[in-house]
Protein backbone atom coordinates (compact mmCIF):
# COMPACT_ATOMS: atom_id res chain seq x y z
CA UNK A 1 0.00 0.00 0.00
CA UNK A 2 1.45 3.35 -1.06
CA UNK A 3 1.52 5.75 1.88
CA UNK A 4 -0.36 8.97 1.41
CA UNK A 5 1.66 12.09 1.07
CA UNK A 6 1.08 14.57 3.85
CA UNK A 7 -1.09 17.49 2.83
CA UNK A 8 0.92 20.51 1.76
CA UNK A 9 0.86 23.41 4.17
CA UNK A 10 -1.20 26.33 2.89
CA UNK A 11 0.80 29.29 1.56
CA UNK A 12 1.00 32.66 3.20
CA UNK A 13 -0.77 35.22 1.02
CA UNK A 14 0.64 38.73 1.21
CA UNK A 15 -1.64 41.48 -0.09
CA UNK A 16 0.65 44.33 -1.13
CA UNK A 17 -1.28 47.61 -1.03
CA UNK A 18 -0.03 50.93 -2.33
CA UNK A 19 -1.09 53.96 -0.29
CA UNK A 20 -3.88 56.23 -1.49
CA UNK A 21 -3.47 59.45 -3.43
CA UNK A 22 -1.95 62.60 -1.96
CA UNK A 23 -1.90 66.18 -3.22
CA UNK A 24 1.42 65.49 -4.98
CA UNK A 25 0.74 62.07 -6.54
CA UNK A 26 2.01 62.08 -10.13
CA UNK A 27 3.61 65.52 -9.72
CA UNK A 28 6.41 65.21 -7.16
CA UNK A 29 8.82 62.53 -5.97
CA UNK A 30 7.98 62.74 -2.25
CA UNK A 31 10.15 59.87 -1.10
CA UNK A 32 10.52 59.75 2.66
CA UNK A 33 9.63 63.39 3.30
CA UNK A 34 7.44 63.70 6.37
CA UNK A 35 4.12 65.46 6.64
CA UNK A 36 2.50 64.21 3.44
CA UNK A 37 -1.05 63.03 4.14
CA UNK A 38 -3.78 61.46 2.03
CA UNK A 39 -5.98 63.81 0.04
CA UNK A 40 -9.77 63.50 0.12
CA UNK A 41 -9.49 61.25 -2.94
CA UNK A 42 -6.79 59.26 -1.18
CA UNK A 43 -8.98 58.67 1.84
CA UNK A 44 -11.72 57.45 -0.48
CA UNK A 45 -9.13 55.18 -2.15
CA UNK A 46 -8.17 53.74 1.23
CA UNK A 47 -11.73 52.98 2.26
CA UNK A 48 -12.38 51.30 -1.09
CA UNK A 49 -9.28 49.14 -0.66
CA UNK A 50 -10.39 48.28 2.87
CA UNK A 51 -13.81 47.18 1.61
CA UNK A 52 -12.16 44.99 -1.02
CA UNK A 53 -9.76 43.39 1.45
CA UNK A 54 -12.69 42.32 3.60
CA UNK A 55 -13.61 40.01 0.67
CA UNK A 56 -10.11 38.52 0.50
CA UNK A 57 -10.64 36.08 3.33
CA UNK A 58 -9.49 36.13 6.92
CA UNK A 59 -6.61 38.60 7.10
CA UNK A 60 -4.72 38.22 10.36
CA UNK A 61 -2.42 41.26 10.35
CA UNK A 62 -1.96 44.66 8.71
CA UNK A 63 1.56 46.07 8.32
CA UNK A 64 2.55 49.52 7.12
CA UNK A 65 5.49 51.65 6.14
CA UNK A 66 5.97 54.32 8.85
CA UNK A 67 5.17 57.29 6.58
CA UNK A 68 1.90 59.17 7.14
CA UNK A 69 0.28 58.31 3.81
CA UNK A 70 0.80 54.59 4.30
CA UNK A 71 -0.22 54.62 7.96
CA UNK A 72 -3.44 56.43 7.08
CA UNK A 73 -4.21 53.92 4.33
CA UNK A 74 -3.38 51.01 6.62
CA UNK A 75 -5.58 52.55 9.32
CA UNK A 76 -8.61 52.35 7.05
CA UNK A 77 -7.79 48.75 6.16
CA UNK A 78 -7.14 47.69 9.75
CA UNK A 79 -10.30 49.44 10.96
CA UNK A 80 -12.45 47.53 8.46
CA UNK A 81 -10.84 44.25 9.56
CA UNK A 82 -10.93 44.92 13.30
CA UNK A 83 -7.13 44.88 13.55
CA UNK A 84 -4.34 47.23 14.61
CA UNK A 85 -1.67 48.61 12.29
CA UNK A 86 1.85 47.25 12.81
CA UNK A 87 4.73 49.37 11.54
CA UNK A 88 7.58 47.78 9.58
CA UNK A 89 10.42 49.95 8.31
CA UNK A 90 11.28 47.40 5.66
CA UNK A 91 8.19 48.58 3.77
CA UNK A 92 9.48 52.17 3.52
CA UNK A 93 9.63 54.09 0.28
CA UNK A 94 12.95 54.15 -1.56
CA UNK A 95 15.36 56.74 -0.20
CA UNK A 96 15.55 59.17 -3.13
CA UNK A 97 18.24 61.26 -1.45
CA UNK A 98 18.76 64.60 -3.20
CA UNK A 99 15.84 63.90 -5.54
CA UNK A 100 13.36 63.89 -2.66
CA UNK A 101 10.62 66.47 -3.14
CA UNK A 102 11.58 67.41 -6.70
CA UNK A 103 9.00 67.76 -9.45
CA UNK A 104 8.76 64.79 -11.78
CA UNK A 105 8.59 67.13 -14.78
CA UNK A 106 12.08 68.40 -13.85
CA UNK A 107 13.54 64.98 -13.09
CA UNK A 108 12.39 63.61 -16.44
CA UNK A 109 14.67 66.12 -18.17
CA UNK A 110 17.80 64.84 -16.42
CA UNK A 111 20.13 62.51 -18.36
CA UNK A 112 19.99 60.08 -15.42
CA UNK A 113 16.24 59.61 -15.91
CA UNK A 114 16.82 57.22 -18.83
CA UNK A 115 19.00 55.06 -16.57
CA UNK A 116 16.28 55.05 -13.89
CA UNK A 117 13.79 53.79 -16.47
CA UNK A 118 15.93 51.43 -18.54
CA UNK A 119 18.72 50.17 -16.25
CA UNK A 120 17.61 50.82 -12.66
CA UNK A 121 19.82 48.06 -11.28
CA UNK A 122 22.83 50.27 -12.08
CA UNK A 123 21.48 53.41 -10.42
CA UNK A 124 21.86 54.92 -6.97
CA UNK A 125 19.95 58.08 -6.08
CA UNK A 126 22.42 60.84 -5.14
CA UNK A 127 22.68 60.70 -1.37
CA UNK A 128 20.13 57.87 -1.20
CA UNK A 129 19.49 54.21 -1.91
CA UNK A 130 20.18 52.12 -4.96
CA UNK A 131 17.30 50.21 -6.52
CA UNK A 132 19.05 46.95 -5.63
CA UNK A 133 19.23 47.97 -1.96
CA UNK A 134 15.55 48.90 -2.03
CA UNK A 135 14.55 45.55 -3.56
CA UNK A 136 16.69 43.62 -1.09
CA UNK A 137 15.25 45.52 1.88
CA UNK A 138 11.60 45.27 0.83
CA UNK A 139 11.83 41.62 -0.19
CA UNK A 140 13.57 40.71 3.07
CA UNK A 141 10.77 42.44 4.99
CA UNK A 142 8.13 40.45 3.11
CA UNK A 143 10.06 37.20 3.69
CA UNK A 144 10.30 37.97 7.41
CA UNK A 145 6.57 38.65 7.65
CA UNK A 146 5.76 35.49 5.70
CA UNK A 147 7.81 33.49 8.20
CA UNK A 148 5.93 35.16 11.07
CA UNK A 149 2.52 34.27 9.59
CA UNK A 150 2.70 30.74 8.13
CA UNK A 151 -0.43 29.81 6.23
CA UNK A 152 -2.13 33.13 6.94
CA UNK A 153 -3.24 36.14 4.91
CA UNK A 154 -1.71 39.51 5.70
CA UNK A 155 -1.82 43.01 4.22
CA UNK A 156 1.30 45.15 3.75
CA UNK A 157 0.80 48.82 2.87
CA UNK A 158 3.80 50.27 1.08
CA UNK A 159 4.80 52.42 -1.90
CA UNK A 160 4.88 51.92 -5.67
CA UNK A 161 8.59 51.23 -6.21
CA UNK A 162 9.08 48.78 -3.31
CA UNK A 163 5.95 46.88 -4.37
CA UNK A 164 7.12 46.78 -8.00
CA UNK A 165 10.51 45.47 -6.85
CA UNK A 166 8.93 42.73 -4.71
CA UNK A 167 6.64 41.72 -7.59
CA UNK A 168 9.57 41.57 -10.01
CA UNK A 169 11.50 39.26 -7.70
CA UNK A 170 8.45 37.05 -7.15
CA UNK A 171 7.93 36.76 -10.92
CA UNK A 172 11.60 36.05 -11.60
CA UNK A 173 11.89 39.27 -13.59
CA UNK A 174 15.19 41.17 -13.67
CA UNK A 175 15.15 44.45 -11.79
CA UNK A 176 15.96 46.30 -15.00
CA UNK A 177 12.45 45.39 -16.21
CA UNK A 178 10.56 46.36 -13.06
CA UNK A 179 9.56 49.77 -14.44
CA UNK A 180 7.22 47.90 -16.80
CA UNK A 181 5.06 46.99 -13.79
CA UNK A 182 2.29 49.44 -12.90
CA UNK A 183 1.21 49.85 -9.27
CA UNK A 184 -1.63 52.37 -8.94
CA UNK A 185 -2.72 54.15 -5.74
CA UNK A 186 -4.53 51.73 -3.42
CA UNK A 187 -4.13 48.84 -5.85
CA UNK A 188 -3.85 45.40 -4.30
CA UNK A 189 -1.28 42.84 -5.42
CA UNK A 190 -1.65 39.44 -3.69
CA UNK A 191 1.29 37.03 -3.76
CA UNK A 192 1.17 33.49 -2.35
CA UNK A 193 4.38 32.32 -0.66
CA UNK A 194 4.57 28.57 -0.15
CA UNK A 195 7.27 25.89 -0.19
CA UNK A 196 7.98 26.45 -3.89
CA UNK A 197 8.29 29.58 -5.97
CA UNK A 198 5.99 32.50 -5.14
CA UNK A 199 2.72 32.69 -7.07
CA UNK A 200 1.64 36.18 -8.12
CA UNK A 201 -2.16 35.96 -7.99
CA UNK A 202 -2.83 39.40 -9.42
CA UNK A 203 -0.97 42.66 -10.08
CA UNK A 204 -2.33 46.18 -9.64
CA UNK A 205 -5.87 44.99 -8.88
CA UNK A 206 -8.13 48.00 -8.38
CA UNK A 207 -11.72 46.94 -8.85
CA UNK A 208 -12.50 43.26 -8.62
CA UNK A 209 -13.57 40.96 -5.81
CA UNK A 210 -10.51 39.33 -4.22
CA UNK A 211 -12.26 36.25 -2.90
CA UNK A 212 -11.46 34.16 -5.99
CA UNK A 213 -7.74 34.87 -5.99
CA UNK A 214 -6.31 31.66 -4.54
CA UNK A 215 -3.42 29.44 -5.62
CA UNK A 216 -4.56 26.76 -8.07
Image: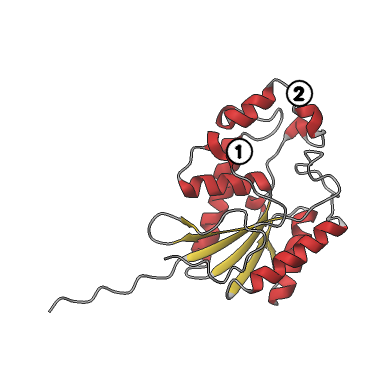
The residue drawn where x is 62% and y is 64% is 155
Q: Extreme left residue here?
A: 1
Disc 1 crowd, CA 10 A, few/some/many (<14, 14-19, 20+): some
Judged left or right of residue 177, residue 78 is right
* Near-viewer residue (27 or 126): 27
Judged left or right of residue 186, residue 117 is left
Residues at marks 2 and 1 touching, judged by CB atoms closer than 8 Å = no
Q: Which residue is denoted by mark 1 in the rendering?
A: 179
Q: Quadrant of residue 109?
A: top right
Query: Is residue 4 at all visible to an observer of this figure?
Result: yes
Q: CA distance from mark 2 to mark 1?
A: 18 Å
172 to 186, vertically: above or below: above
Disc 2 crowd, CA 10 A, few/some/many (<14, 14-19, 20+): few
Count numbered badges in the picture. Answer: 2
Q: Secondary structure at mark 1?
A: helix
Q: Residue 168, image x and y in percent?
A: 52, 45
Q: Residue 83, image x and y in percent?
A: 69, 74
The residue drawn where x is 42% and y is 66% is 216
Query: Is residue 75 at all visible to an observer of this figure?
Result: no
Q: How is the image coloured?
A: secondary structure
Q: Residue 190, image x and y in percent?
A: 56, 60
Q: Residue 43, image x and y in percent?
A: 82, 61
* Near-viewer residue (187 or 86): 187
Q: Earlier in the sequence, mark 2 or mark 1?
A: 2
159 to 120, vertically: above or below: below
* Near-viewer residue (90 or 202): 202
Q: Quadrant of residue 133?
A: top right
Q: Secondary structure at mark 2?
A: loop
Q: Extreme top residue here?
A: 111
Numbered tag placed on residue 153 in the rendering: none
Q: Extreme bottom residue here?
A: 1
Numbered tag placed on residue 109 in the rendering: 2
Amino acid sequence: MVPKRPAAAPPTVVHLVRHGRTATTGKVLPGRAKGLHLSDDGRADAHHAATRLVTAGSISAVYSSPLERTRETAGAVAGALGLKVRIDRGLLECDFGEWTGRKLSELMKLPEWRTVQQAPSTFRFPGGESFIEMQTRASAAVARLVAAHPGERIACVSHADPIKAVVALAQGVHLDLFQRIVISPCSITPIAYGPGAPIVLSVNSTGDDLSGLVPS
